[in-house]
Image (spheres, grey):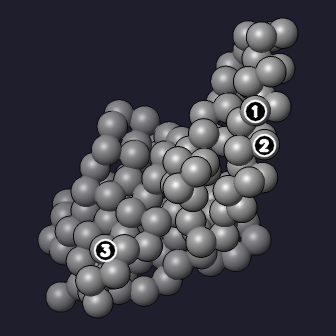
Amino acid sequence: MALQVEVVAPEKILYSGEADMVIARTTDGEIAFMTGHAPFIGSLGIGAVRIRTSEGDDVTAAVHEGFVEVTDDRVTILSDVAELVDDIDANRAQKAVDELQQRKGDQDDAEAEAALRRARLRVELAGG
């Protein structure tokens, strides 16, 4: 039996399908979900969500915080900002990193640091 997985952002469902495993970064660290996993609700940090589909393919999404819920072999990822790796514009992401690094010298606040972490994640996942 496979997991039923949905990755949902406000504008659309990024992924919906069956999977053998889902790996996500919670605020407490990485966690993997497989069939039969105990019920779970957790807060997601900035990180990749990796889905190993039942066909053996990998689907990866950049998730910029949110929540994960696991119940009855169903994994739901909810995020205000998330995108599949194939949808990331690597050049745009690198440009954002460069701009944020320049601005970071002028200010040292948590919001700027989070924006830089999000941009770096996008570059990393896009293979940049």
> Relative to 103, does residue 127 appear above or below in the rendering?
below
Residue 86: image x %, image y %? Answer: 59, 72
Q: Amino acid at mark 3?
A: Arg
Q: Amino acid at mark 1?
A: Asp
For the N terminus, the quadrant is bottom left
Q: Which label lies toward us, 2 or 3? A: 2
Q: Residues within 10 Å of mark 3 (few under 14, many from 20)?
A: some
Residue 92: image x %, image y %? Answer: 78, 52
Of helix, strand and loop, which one carries label 2?
Answer: helix
Quickly name the residue at label 2: 95
- Tags 1 and 2 in contact by the CB under 8 Å rule? yes
Mark with earlier residue (1, 3) = 3
> Relative to 55, does residue 91 appear above or below in the rendering?
above
> How far apart, in angstroms, are the residues tagged by discs 2 and 3?
30 Å
Residue 52's mark?
3
Q: Residues within 10 Å of mark 1 (few under 14, many from 20)?
A: some
